[in-house]
């Protein structure tokens, strides 16, 4: 009788692991579905403005442009033709010239300054870094009025230096702050080994330390380039109308319709798409280095 009871009890307990495994499998499936829904929501949330931008840029006629329906046509490329008829290529050229000057100068000066703060035996490093961080947080609008008077006196209004000098001033502290993290994460033993092998301090810097900090340098360069490309306040104040210097963001702000009663929303969105394409291509080309740089800085810092 007792053997029969034990056998029945064993049969009763036997399905428990299977139920537990089934419940675990259901939980895993539920988690996967939940993650997929969350990722899909974030994906749609992030991409919806770009979908609206592209849809609006291709709409034709006032009725289509004033309709919030994304699929309200007719569609076409007339807005893009209008953009390039307004000499937008000159504005793109000016934008990238200023952005490239700003990025190159910021990276060169920022690399030297960051290496000095990270590796050289300087006194009061915390005070220097606090000053750099405070300068990177300074609002640009506070410096525009005095800079405008200084630029007018020096003859720098409507010139490339009149734009990229303030851009460098505003982005250099952030560049130094980012690069100090990467230079600090490189082992000192590598630089000391290069010095033992006969390398000069300059050779140690550009042959050993700088290649190891390349992900961080790329990440900082991308951030500076995107800032200089999208900047509007300084560009619209120091070079508002001259076609030889006017940047794309300022030109978009001055777009007008065929009449004063027509909203140029189609032309504006088309210009925004045009200026976004080079940035998207550049980000896709360097995405691995950007991600490596950002994640390396977050872990090693």
Image (cartoon, rainbow, N blue to C red):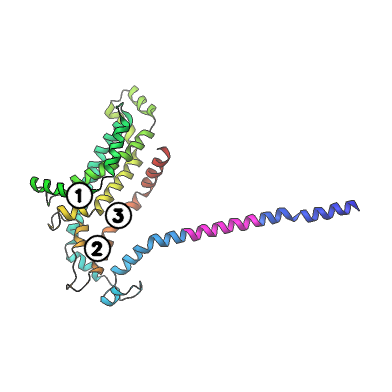
Q: Which residue is nearer to you in this view: 199 or 262?
A: 262
Q: Is residue 166 above or below residue 242?
A: above
- Relative side of 70 to 40, left or right: left
Please provide percent x and percent y for residue 192.
Answer: 36, 25
User: Residue 184: within the magenta?
Assistant: no
Rendered residue at 14%/54% (across/down): 239
Instruction: State the predominant SS element of the stretch in magenta.
Output: helix
Q: Which residues are magenta?
A: 23-38
Q: Earlier in the sequence, mark 2 or mark 3?
A: 2
Q: Which residue is mark 2?
A: 271
Please provide percent x and percent y for residue 5.
Answer: 86, 54
Structural distance between the alpha carbons of marks 1 and 2: 18 Å
Mark 1 residue crowding within 10 angstroms, few (<14) / some (14–19) / many (20+): many
Rendered residue at 39%/27% (across/down): 189
* Res. 209 image quadrant: top left
Furthest residue toward right: 1
SS label for mark 1: helix
The image's mark for residue 195 is none
Mark 2 residue crowding within 10 angstroms, few (<14) / some (14–19) / many (20+): many
Q: Which residue is mark 3?
A: 279
User: Residue 28: within the magenta?
Assistant: yes
Q: Which residue is mark 1?
A: 98
Q: Earlier in the sequence, mark 1 or mark 2?
A: 1
């Amino acid at each position: 009788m007792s053997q029969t009871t034990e056998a029945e009890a064993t049969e009763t307990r036997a399905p428990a692991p299977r139920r537990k495994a089934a419940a675990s499998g259901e939980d895993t499936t539920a988690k996967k579905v939940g993650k997929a829904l969350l990722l899909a929501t974030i994906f749609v949330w992030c991409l919806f403005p770009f979908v609206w931008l592209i849809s609006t840029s291709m709409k034709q006629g006032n009725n289509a442009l004033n309709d919030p329906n994304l699929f309200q046509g007719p569609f076409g490329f007339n807005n893009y033709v209008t953009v390039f008829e307004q000499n937008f290529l000159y504005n793109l050229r000016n934008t990238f010239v200023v952005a490239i000057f700003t990025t190159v100068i910021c990276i060169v000066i920022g690399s030297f300054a960051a290496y000095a703060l990270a590796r050289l035996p300087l006194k009061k490093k915390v005070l220097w870094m606090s000053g750099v961080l405070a300068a990177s947080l300074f609002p640009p609008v506070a410096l525009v009025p005095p800079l405008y008077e200084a630029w007018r006196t020096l003859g720098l209004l409507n010139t490339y230096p009149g734009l990229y000098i303030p851009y460098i001033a505003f982005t250099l502290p952030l560049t130094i702050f980012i690069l100090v993290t990467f230079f600090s994460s490189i082992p000192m033993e590598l630089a000391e080994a290069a010095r033992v092998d006969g390398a000069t301090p300059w050779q140690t810097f550009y042959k050993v330390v700088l290649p190891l900090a390349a992900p961080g340098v790329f990440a900082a360069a991308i951030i500076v380039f995107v800032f200089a490309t999208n900047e509007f306040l300084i560009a619209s104040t120091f070079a508002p109308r001259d076609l030889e210097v006017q940047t794309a963001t300022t030109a978009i702000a001055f777009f007008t319709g065929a009449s004063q009663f027509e909203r140029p929303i189609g032309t504006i969105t088309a210009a925004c798409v045009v200026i976004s394409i080079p940035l998207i291509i550049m980000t896709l080309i360097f995405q691995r280095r950007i991600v490596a740089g950002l994640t390396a800085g977050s872990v090693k810092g």
